[in-house]
Amino acid sequence: MSDQDVKQAFSHYAKLSLVNRTRSLYSQDQRQVLKVPLNEETVEYPIDDGPPIIKLLTEKQAIHFEEYLVNERLIIAISRLTDAQKKLLYYKYVERLSDKAIGQILHVSSQAISKRHRKVLSKIGSTFFD
């Protein structure tokens, strides 16, 4: 399997799993919406003007990334990653940050992030496709 195939397989399964988990979390959040009485104060200062922002995972939850997946082989592959590797996947696939932005967060170059990303995908691929 080529690196490109590994990337596509990982992206496909991770995105499907995260979308399903997001829908579940969004449904739970909708049930917990506070009911605000209408009065002068709430009418003048609306609570939320825009559409709801759905956060898939938080950075703290990234180290337990495999708990949000449904594919067993992918869960095993992700569980074998280090916390740093899982955070890299979080920044790349959940936050959708560029290598440069991730590098700024982790205080390394974008080339180092690219290399780490390829290494993580290769590790996932070797576990996933065995």
Image: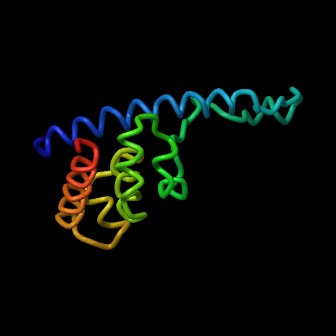
Q: In this view of the protein, which residue sits in the foreground, 125 or 102?
A: 125
Using the rendered view, name the quadrant where residue 107 is placed. bottom left
Location of residue 26 with respect to 116 vertically, above or below: above
Question: Colour scheme of this structure image?
Answer: rainbow
Residue in the image at 50% along x and 28% along y: 20
Location of residue 15 with respect to 91 vertically, above or below: above
| Image-based side of 25 in relation to 37, left or right | left
Q: In this view of the protein, which residue sits in the foreground, 26 or 64?
A: 64
Hey, which residue is sitting farthest front in the picture?
Answer: 130
Residue in the image at 59% along x and 31% along y: 52
Location of residue 23 with respect to 121 vertically, above or below: above
Q: Position of residue 68 (x, y in %)?
A: 50, 41
Q: Position of residue 58 (x, y in %)?
A: 53, 51
| Image-based side of 113 in relation to 33, left or right | left
| Image-based side of 36 in relation to 71, left or right | right
Q: Position of residue 108 (x, y in %)?
A: 27, 72
Residue in the image at 85% along x and 36% along y: 41
| Quadrant location of the C terminus in the rendered image | top left
Q: Position of residue 100 (x, y in %)?
A: 25, 60
Hey, which residue is sitting farthest bottom in the picture?
Answer: 107
Residue in the image at 61% along x and 34% along y: 25
| Quadrant location of the N terminus in the rendered image | top left
Q: In this view of the protein, which residue sits in the foreground, 53 or 85?
A: 85
Using the rendered view, name the quadrant where residue 114 is placed. bottom left
| Image-based side of 51 in relation to 103, left or right | right
**Number of disc labels:** 0
